[in-house]
């Protein structure tokens, strides 16, 4: 019989939700992010330009999520990972409302699925997390679904 | 920037997304770590990277995702809206090392590219879907994905 990688304890995590993480968005965070990406779009940084554009002020670039994610979405698994190596597999993200400096975002993760597959180097465990970002008005600003690979 | 706005009427299935060149450097990865809050040593420490089974520190998947976001927001302009972005981190990319404090060594340049796969109107929104990807210097798509955008419509302007 094949060795069971996904134990009952791991399986029990499916459907579990993380404690909400709260992040206050600051202009400097957005600027640092845009600089790291080398994205000079004035919508992210130039107050005067942004005031006259679509959103009437600075907004965060779509990929800015990660900043929020790594402080808020840092996934704590309520179980011991079966293997030592972890890779980000990717995902999909939906942007619903602009994120602005001064917004206070609340991030919640839900373990949507955990499954195993046979990879090139042996068994791999895929952990799918669904994330919801809400602002201070309780509006959903973004949703995401991402996969971490443990192998 | 005051770029020319892209309109729904300007694109057809097969239209190319204006390509965007990127050079990942060890310096950029450090900036990204600070900017994103991802301090996984896989992205800056040789021995840790080796322990994880890669040759040397690799480019963060999320940085490549942010490049793809940059590709799309540049293309759609101020009047467009990026609705959805998806990507998979399939291949490892290794940053260029630095030659001086500000300049990288010669080496690989990555290209973010895309093509339009679909256009349609839904709930009064003019929607365009694209296949997008990051390709390495060998032309391999290390980060394939897709994007859905809303573009302004010329006839609605008046």
Image (cartoon, rainbow, N blue to C red):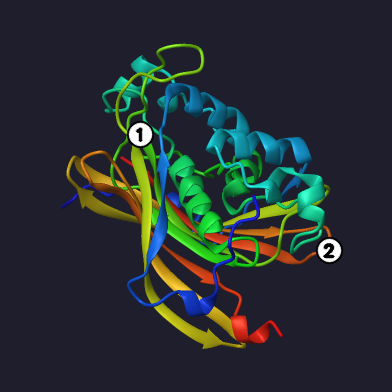
Q: Are marks 2 and 1 on the same chain?
A: yes
Which residue is rendered at x = 65% and y = 61% of the image?
A: B78
Relative height, residue B153 to residue B93 (above, below) = below
In the rendered image, the quadrant that contains the C terminus of chain B is bottom right
Q: Position of residue B51 (x, y in %)?
A: 31, 22
Q: Is residue A27 above or below residue B34?
A: below
Residue B155, by quadrant, is: bottom right
Is B85 left, or right, of B144 in this rendering?
Answer: right
Is any part of residue A111 visible from this angle?
Answer: no
Secondary element under disc 2, as helix, strand or loop, is loop
Residue at 59%, 61% in the rendered image: B77
Q: Which residue has dot 2 on it?
A: A137
Within-10-Å neighbours for mark 1: few <14, some 14–19, many 20+: few
Residue B55 lies in quadrant:
top left
A35 and A117: which is toward the camera: A35
Comes first in the chain, label 2 or label 1: 1
Q: Which residue is mark 1?
A: A85
Query: Residues at badges 2 and 1 in contact (C-beta under 8 Å)?
Result: no
The answer to whether one can see residue A103 in this image is yes
Q: Chain of mark 2?
A: A
A20 relative to B105 in the view: left or right: right
* Element type where label 1 sits in the image: loop
């Amino acid at each position: 019989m094949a060795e069971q990688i996904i134990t009952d304890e791991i399986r029990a995590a499916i459907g579990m939700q993380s404690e909400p993480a709260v992040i206050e968005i600051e202009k400097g965070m957005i600027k640092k992010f845009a600089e790291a990406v080398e994205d000079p779009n004035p919508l992210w940084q130039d107050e005067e330009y942004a005031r006259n554009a679509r959103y009437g002020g600075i907004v965060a670039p779509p990929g800015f999520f990660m900043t929020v994610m790594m402080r808020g979405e840092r996934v704590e698994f309520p179980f011991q990972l079966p293997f030592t190596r972890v890779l980000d597999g990717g995902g999909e993200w939906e942007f619903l409302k602009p994120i602005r400096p001064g917004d206070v975002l609340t991030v919640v993760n839900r373990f949507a699925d955990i499954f195993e597959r046979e990879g090139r180097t042996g068994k791999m465990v895929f952990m799918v997390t669904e994330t919801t970002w809400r602002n201070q008005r309780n509006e959903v600003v973004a949703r995401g679904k991402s996969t971490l690979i443990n192998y | 920037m005051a770029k020319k706005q892209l309109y729904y009427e300007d694109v057809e299935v097969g239209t190319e997304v204006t390509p965007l060149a990127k050079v990942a450097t060890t310096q950029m990865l450090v900036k990204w770590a600070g900017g994103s809050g991802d301090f996984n040593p896989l992205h800056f420490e040789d021995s840790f990277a080796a322990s994880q089974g890669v040759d040397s520190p690799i480019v963060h998947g999320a940085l490549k995702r942010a490049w793809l976001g940059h590709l799309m927001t540049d293309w759609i302009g101020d009047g467009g809206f990026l609705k959805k972005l998806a990507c998979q981190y399939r291949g490892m990319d290794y940053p260029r090392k630095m030659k001086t404090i500000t300049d990288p060594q010669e080496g690989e340049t990555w290209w973010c590219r895309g093509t339009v796969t679909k256009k349609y109107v839904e709930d009064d929104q003019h929607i365009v879907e694209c296949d997008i990807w990051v390709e390495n210097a060998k032309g391999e798509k290390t980060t394939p994905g897709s994007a859905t955008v809303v573009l302004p419509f010329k006839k609605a302007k008046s």
